[in-house]
Image (cartoon, rainbow, N blue to C red):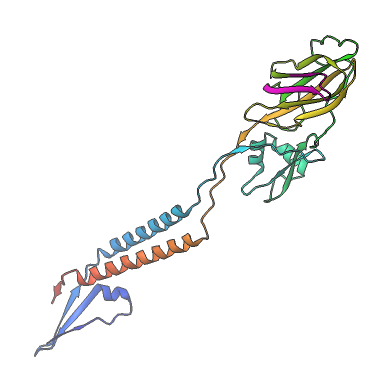
Amino acid sequence: MKYIEPLHTKSLRGVMQALCVSQRTNKPQTTCYNLPAMKRPVILLALLLALLWLIGYSFTAQASAPAQGGAFSTPTPLPDGRIIYIVQPGDSCFRISALTGIPIEQIRSLNRLGEDCALREGQELLLGIGGPSGATPTAEAAITPTPEVQPTPTAPLAGEAQVCVVFYNDLNGDALRQDTEPLLAGGALSISGASGQFSQTANTPGGTEPVCFERVPEGNYNISIAPPENYNPTTQLNHTLTINAGEQVEIIFGAQQAIAELPTEPEQGSNGPGSLLGILGVGFLLAGLGLGVFAWRFYGRKPTYTK
C-alpha cells in the first residue's frame, strides 16, 4: 500500500522542491517527486512584472485629464483703481506673468514677495493701478491748451472745440500708456452730446495719429469705445465730460489682447471611489494568477521518479 508523505520542511520553498511517496512493503521504500527548480525564478519574475504593469496601468487610468485651455481676461480695476488677481490652484509667478504679460520682478515688487516667489491658493496679487471703475468717471486725459499729437491739429473756431481720442494696445495691461505701446486699429468710437447737439462715430485706424473730431459744439458729451474682437479693455469704456468752446481735449482708451490660458498640470492620483475599485481589482487579479500558478505547478506536471 502506498501513502503520500510530504517532506517535513519549515518553508514553502521546501514543499515546492520535493514531494515523497513511501511504500509499505517487505522492503520499505520511499520515492520522491522532484519539482523543476529552474523555472521558479522565471515564474516569479513574470509575476513581478505583471504586478508592476498592473499598478502602473491603474494609476495611469485614474489620472485626471488636463484642464481645457481658455481665454484669460484682465481683471477689472477696483473702485480704488487697483487691479487684483486671485491666485488659482497650480499658479506660480511664472504662469501669472505669462498670462498677464507683467514681468515677474514687477509682481514680486508690488506684492513684497521673496526670491522664491511663494504663493498660496486664494491670495490676492496686485498687478497694477488703473482707472477706478464706475458709471460716470471723470475724463482720464487732462485738458491742455495745445494738442500733444504731431502734426498739430487745426485750432478750433470760436464757440467750438476739438476732441481727439487715443486708443492704444495696452501690452502689459497696467492701464497706463507707455511710449512703446502702439495705437490699436479696429475700435468702434462714438461721441454724442447730451442734448443731441453733436453725434459722430468712427473706427480707429491705428498708425501713429489719434482720431480727432473737429468743430464740436460746447456742452456735455459721452465718449465711448468698443474694443475689437479678442481684445479686453484695460481702461474704462466711456467718459462723460463737459467741453467748453475753444478747448482741445484728448481722451485715452486702452485694450489688451486676450491670452490663452496655459494648461495646468494634471492632478496626481485621486481619492475617489475609482481608486479603491482599482486597488481591489489588482488584488483579485494577482490572487487569481497566484492560484493558477500554484495549481499548474502541483497538478499539471508529471512526477519524476528518483530511486
Across and down, in percent, residue 156 comes to 86, 11
Residue 181 in sight from this viewpoint: no
14 sits to left or right of 262: left
Query: Between 22 and 115, which is closer to the camera in this rendering?
Result: 115
Quarter assignment of residue 138: top right
Residue 252 locus on image (x, y percent): 78, 25
* Residue in the image at 75% along x and 30% along y: 237
Which residue appears farthest toward the bottom when viewing the image?
26
Is residue 190 within the magenta segment? yes
Residues 161 and 52: in front is: 161
Say above or below: 306 vs 1.
above
Q: What stretch is highlighted in magenta?
A: 186-200
Answer left or right for 72 relative to 162: left
Image coordinates of residue 166 in percent, x first then y, are 76, 21
The residue positioned 52% from the left and 46% from the top of the image is: 66
Q: In this view, does 163 lie to the left or right of 291?
A: right
Magenta region includes residue 167 = no
Q: Quadrant of residue 255?
A: top right
Front one among 209 and 123:
209
Question: How far from the left and from the top, in percent, is residue 94?
Answer: 64, 40
273 lies above or below 100: below
Front one among 253 and 124:
253
Q: Is the magenta stretch mostly helix, strand or loop?
A: strand
